[in-house]
Image: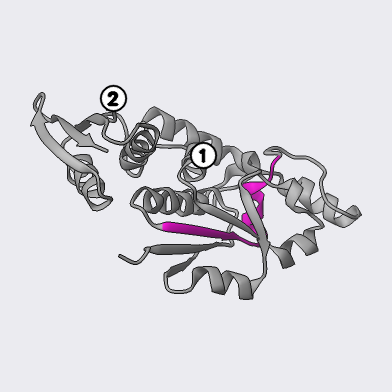
C-alpha cells in the first residue's frame, strides 16, 4: 500500500490556527500518514528554539521584529486576543477539559516523526538560521523542494 | 508482556496519538490493553490500530461507557 501523505503549509502564527495545524499533523501521523509541515513567515514563530521573547536574527530590524513576535509563548489568537491574555486563558481551559495544549500537540507531532521544514525565504528576511529553531526542524527548504516532498499527497494551507 | 494505557480522559487526537506512541515503545508480540471511553475513542482506536497492521484481540466493556481494547503488536 502506498504511503499516505499530508503536507501542511503553516503560514499563520496564530494560536488557534497552530492548534488546528498540529492537531491535524499529530492525528494524521498517528494514523500512519507521512506528515510534512512547511513553516513560513509567521508560522516560523511556533518552532523557534527559544519560546519567549528573545533577540535573535541578523541586523537591527530583524532583531526588533523577532523580539516583537516572540516565540511559541507569545503567539496571539486570531480573534479576541485581548493583548495576549486569550492564548493563556485558552490553554488553561484546554488543560481543565483534558484537551491537548498547543505545546503538547507539538511534542506529540515530534514524537510521531512529523517532518518540520522551515522556509528559506522567510528565514532570510527575518535574519534567522536553522540553529534558531527546535532541533526537530529537519531542513531549510524552498518552494521546489517542498513541492517535491509533498508530491502525491494532500496539501493544506493554514 | 502486557502493557496498559488509560486514555479515558483524553480527547481527539490524543486518544490515538497516545496509543500509537505506546505501541511504538513496546516490543513486537507484546500486548497493549487500552482503557477508553465509548464514542470516538472506541470507534477510532481499534480501527486505526487494525489499519496499521496491529492485531485487535478483544474489546470488552468494563463499566457503562468504559471499554478495554486489547491490541497485539
Classify the position of the N terminus of chain B by image quarter. top left
Q: Where does the image place residue A50, in percent across and percent down from the top left?
A: 71, 39
SS for dot 1: helix
Indicate whether B6 appears above or below A27: above
Residue for badge 2: B3
Magenta extent: A34-49
Q: Nearer the viewer, residue A102 or B36?
A: B36
Q: Residue at x 84, y 50 (%)?
A: A63
Q: Where does the image place residue B51, in percent across and percent down from the top left?
A: 24, 53
Q: Quadrant of residue B46?
A: top left
Residue A107 image label: 1
Q: Residues within 10 Å of mark 2 (few under 14, many from 20)?
A: some
Q: Residue at x 9, y 31 (%)?
A: B60
Instruction: Chain letter for mark 1, please.
Output: A
Q: Is residue A14 magenta?
A: no
Q: Residues within 10 Å of mark 1 (few under 14, many from 20)?
A: some
Residue lying farthest to the right in this orientation: A60
Residue A75 image label: none
Tags 2 and 1 on a common chain:
no
Is residue A109 rendered to the left or right of residue B57? right
Residue lying farthest to the front in this orientation: B29
Instruction: Chain letter for mark 2, please.
Output: B
Q: Where does the image place residue B35, in percent across and percent down from the top left?
A: 22, 28
Indicate whether B59 appears above or below A7: above
Q: Nearer the viewer, mark 2 or mark 1?
A: 2
Amino acid at each position: 500500500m502506498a504511503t499516505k501523505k499530508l503536507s501542511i503549509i503553516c503560514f499563520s502564527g496564530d494560536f488557534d490556527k497552530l492548534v488546528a495545524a498540529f492537531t491535524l499533523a499529530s492525528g494524521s501521523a498517528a494514523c500512519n500518514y507521512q506528515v510534512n509541515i512547511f513553516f513560513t513567515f509567521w508560522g516560523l514563530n511556533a518552532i523557534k528554539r527559544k519560546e519567549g521573547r528573545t533577540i535573535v536574527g541578523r541586523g537591527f530590524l530583524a532583531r526588533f521584529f523577532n523580539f516583537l513576535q516572540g516565540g511559541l509563548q507569545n503567539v496571539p489568537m486570531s480573534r479576541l486576543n485581548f493583548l495576549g491574555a486569550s492564548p493563556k486563558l485558552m490553554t488553561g481551559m484546554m488543560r481543565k477539559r483534558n484537551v491537548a495544549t498547543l505545546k503538547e500537540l507539538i511534542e506529540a507531532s515530534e514524537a510521531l516523526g512529523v517532518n518540520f521544514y522551515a522556509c528559506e525565504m522567510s528565514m532570510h528576511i527575518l535574519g534567522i538560521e536553522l540553529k534558531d529553531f527546535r532541533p526537530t526542524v529537519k531542513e531549510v527548504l524552498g518552494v521546489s523542494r517542498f513541492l517535491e516532498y509533498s508530491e502525491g499527497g494532500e496539501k493544506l494551507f493554514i | 508482556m502486557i502493557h496498559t494505557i488509560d486514555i479515558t480522559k483524553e480527547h481527539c487526537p490524543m486518544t490515538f496519538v497516545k496509543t500509537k506512541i505506546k505501541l511504538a515503545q513496546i516490543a513486537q508480540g507484546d500486548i497493549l490493553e487500552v482503557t477508553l471511553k465509548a464514542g470516538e475513542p472506541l470507534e477510532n482506536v481499534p480501527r486505526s490500530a487494525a489499519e496499521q497492521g496491529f492485531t485487535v484481540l478483544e474489546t470488552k466493556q468494563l463499566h457503562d461507557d468504559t471499554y478495554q481494547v486489547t491490541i497485539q503488536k
